Amino acid sequence: MAILDIFKKKKEIERKVIEKKIEEKPVAKKRPVFICNIVSAPRISEKASGLAEKNQYVFNVFAKVNKNQVKKAVQSIYSVDVLAVNIINIHPKARRLGRSEGFKKGFKKAIVRIKEGQKIEVI
């Protein structure tokens, strides 16, 4: 009977401690980004030549780099002092030829401003 169970002694429940072994999973190492892969080529256009007069140079860059990596790469390759870096993502654009559809490849470009009096030979 459930009512009379109140007066019975309660047995202590043995608690078993289960030790869990924590296994460390190996962390995937990031592949190093080499300087030669960051800045692929300078962009030569009418707008880029106009910016070159203002100590700003335009480069095609690898799609997954950031401003700090571009700054270090340009400083080491061209031996100039970089003041600022602006990065622009150009998205792929849809193109058609008859019934076939495709995309024009997108890319990433960086506008690098260097110190006054320094120059980069683009051509």
Image (tube, grey):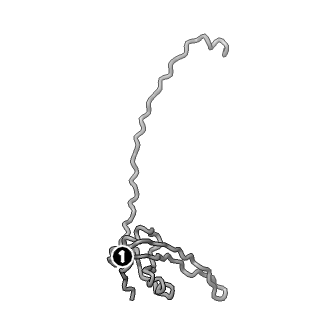
Q: How many marks?
A: 1
> Residue visible at 45% across and 72% down?
85
Image coords of residue 70 (percent x, y): 41, 72
Image coords of residue 25 (percent x, y): 40, 51
Three-letter residue code for mark 1: Cys
The one of 88 and 81 positioned closer to us in this rendering? 81
Q: What residue is disc 1 on?
A: 36
> Residue visible at 58% across and 11% down?
8
Report the residue that reaches farthest toward the front: 116
Image coords of residue 62 (percent x, y): 44, 74
Indicate the quadrant containing the N terminus: top left, top right, bottom left or bottom right. Answer: top right
Q: Is residue 2 above or below residue 123?
A: above
Image coords of residue 63 (percent x, y): 47, 72
> Residue visible at 44% across and 71% down?
84
The one of 46 and 100 positioned closer to us in this rendering? 46
Q: Is residue 117 above or below residue 15?
A: below
Indicate the quadrant containing the C terminus: top left, top right, bottom left or bottom right. Answer: bottom left
- Residue 3: quarter of image: top right
Q: Is residue 113 above or below residue 17?
A: below
Q: Is residue 29 above or below residue 82?
A: above
Which element is circle 1 on?
A: helix
Residues packed near mark 1 inside 10 Å, few (<14), some (14 to 19) or many (20 plus): few
The one of 56 and 72 positioned closer to us in this rendering? 56
The one of 83 and 78 positioned closer to us in this rendering? 83
